[in-house]
Image (tube, grey):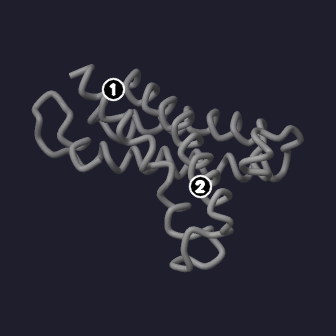
Amino acid sequence: MVQIPFLNTEYSYVNTIILGVFILIWTNDTFAFLIGKNFGKHKLLERISPNKTIEGFIGGMVFTFIASLILTRVFSSLSLDKWIVIAGIVSVFGVLGDLIESMFKRQAGVKDSSNFIPGHGGFLDRFDSVIFAAPFIFIYLQLVQ
């Protein structure tokens, strides 16, 4: 993850790239929750994470793509097509990271991964999306440079 800001044409540190990645992850997590909570009817993987819905997944993805369009205007560090691909990576692999972390918690028989952030599922719940999506973003940016 620390190498992602260096993956640009000049190989210099560009903080807007990693900030943009976090904005996309937060957008995906937030809107997946909001859409899923308000409109979710069909469970995504009920056995692993009973509150995740297909509608939430799609809603998070749609708003993440919209956020990538906004990032293109605000941060000129990457082109539109790169921000859109990163939005797709975040949408898919961020949710996979969240599901994998939920599966680990279920297997361990715990509700939260820690008490560090009470009411939020623990420390890992705040970072499971970025931990899982970051290597794929790194690989993608490495391939397109």
Amino acid type shown at disc 1: Tyr
Amino acid type shown at disc 2: Phe
Is 145 located above or below residue 124 in the figure? above
Please state if 79 lies on the left or on the right of 97 as rendered: left
Q: Position of residue 134 (x, y in %)?
A: 38, 42
Q: Where is residue 93 in the image (x, y as percent from the top left)?
A: 52, 37
User: Which residue is rendered at x = 49% and y = 38% of the image?
Assistant: 90
Sequence-wise, which precedes: disc 2 or disc 1? Answer: 2
Q: Which numbered dot is residue 127?
A: none
Please state if 42 lies on the left or on the right of 81 as rendered: right
Q: Name the residue under label 2.
A: 104
**Crowding at label 2, few (<14), some or many (≥20) Cα neighbours within 10 Å?**
some
Is 118 located above or below residue 3 in the figure? below
User: Which residue is rendered at x = 68% and y = 46% of the image?
Assistant: 32
Q: Where is residue 96 in the image (x, y as percent from the top left)?
A: 57, 40
Question: Distance between the Cα atoms at labels 2 and 1?
Answer: 27 Å
Quadrant containing the C terminus is top left
Q: Position of residue 22 (x, y in %)?
A: 42, 50
Quarter-wise, where is residue 135 in the image? top left
